[in-house]
Amino acid sequence: MNFDLTTDQLQLQARVRDFAQAEVAPIAEKLDKDGKFPTELFKKLGELGVMSIPFADKYGGMGLGVFESVLALEEVARADQSLAVSAMVSMATGLTLSRFGSQPLIDKWLPEIVTGQKICAIAGTEPNAGSDTGGFKTRSKMVGNDRWSISGEKAFITNAGTDISLFTLLLTVSSPPEAEKKQFTLFLVPNEAKGYTRGEKYGKLGWKSSDTRPLYFDDCQVDADNVVGGAHKGRWVLHKGYQAARLFLAACSVGLAQASLDHAVNYAKERQAFGGSLGRLQLIQEMIAEIALQVDTARLLTYRAAWNVDQGRDNLKELSMAKYHATEAGTKCADLAIQVHGGWGYMDDCPVSRYYRDNRICTIGDGSSQIQKLLIARECGLDVSFT
């Protein structure tokens, strides 16, 4: 078992880290305050090659693996998790298209996502159904022989309303209303499709510079060729897409946890209290040691899951363990870092307060911590039901 990164992986990690610390970290507080999607900064990620990492070279990608994507996303999140999540959603959506889309769809829509000059979204969640995909109500029906009509509403969707948003992968109920069992179909819906509108941005606790809003579909018609993964097979395809997103979100939490450790250690060394540095106090040392432990265990679980995906072993238990532990660890690390910083940690201009706000959604999005525990229990052989 080799825990060392290769020379190429170390160089990629360093290149992204240098960019993130020089270009992203210094303006992260301003991005949070402004609450606007940073189009030009995102394009710079594309120019750096971050968005191209896991895609084949024939689409302009680097042809690397999920593991290298995790390394890069961790470094972006270490500077600003809000930017990292915008990147990871587009990356996971692009991977879903590249795995399950038809060749004409891939050729037309994927290249601009790979370059990072455009961004895309994946839409499952609805106002009254999230992890319970069986509760979705957005419907699609055939209109003639080669068109589908879509009507309904999606909620809390990332990346759909920026000025460089290109398309949304949309999960719909495609079985008749009277059907005993629901069937689902996933569609690629271009942003300019008639009958598809984006609602106003949500006001959020964190991730303020990422684009999150409701989506509305009113007799939105798309070609049958826009089906991704086959008619009535969309639920399975979406779940596969969510597995990638869960792993990438775990990486985003690892990056934020590492940033929490960075700030806590630096502050403990610099802050003077009781006749010396804050860091000489044993209870401060205990909190920092706990942060360090959480960072490393989260990173190990995430790296293992990513490595196994690249080996062709999609182990759902490992993916769920990584997502659960890393996202929970991110929040714990940010919370402890606030405690180390004392009163200043509670202030908006202290980075760790932003970390706490940003990471809070990570234990909910792409399958909540509670869902991950159920998946882990099921993979351990227990009789777990989601109904």
Image (spheres, rainbow, N blue to C red):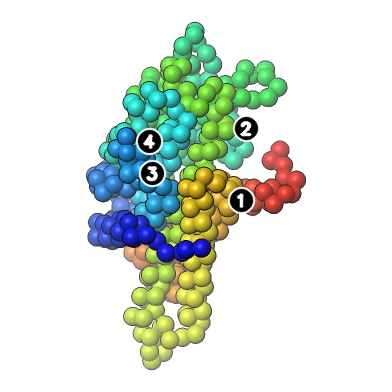
Per the image, label 1 sits on a secondary structure element best described as helix
Label 4 – label 2 distance at C-alpha: 24 Å
Per the image, label 2 sits on a secondary structure element best described as helix
Image location of residue 340, percent across then percent down: 44, 75
Amino acid at circle 1: Lys
Please name the residue that numbered disc 4 is placed on. 120
Is the residue under label 2 in contact with that under label 3 (CB below 8 Å)? no
Count residues near mark 3 (Cα–Cα under 10 Å), then give few for <14, some for 14-19, many for 20+. Answer: many
Residue drawn 43% across the image and 41% down it? 92
Depth-wise, is mark 3 or mark 4 nearer the camera? 3
Please name the residue that numbered disc 1 is placed on. 317
The quarter in which the C terminus is drawn is top right
Please name the residue that numbered disc 3 is placed on. 54
Give the vertical position of 236 relative to 17 (above or below).
above
**First along the sequence among labels 4 and 2:** 4
Residue drawn 59% across the image and 47% down it? 316
Label 1 – label 4 distance at C-alpha: 28 Å
Image location of residue 222, percent across then percent down: 43, 18
**First along the sequence among labels 1 and 4:** 4
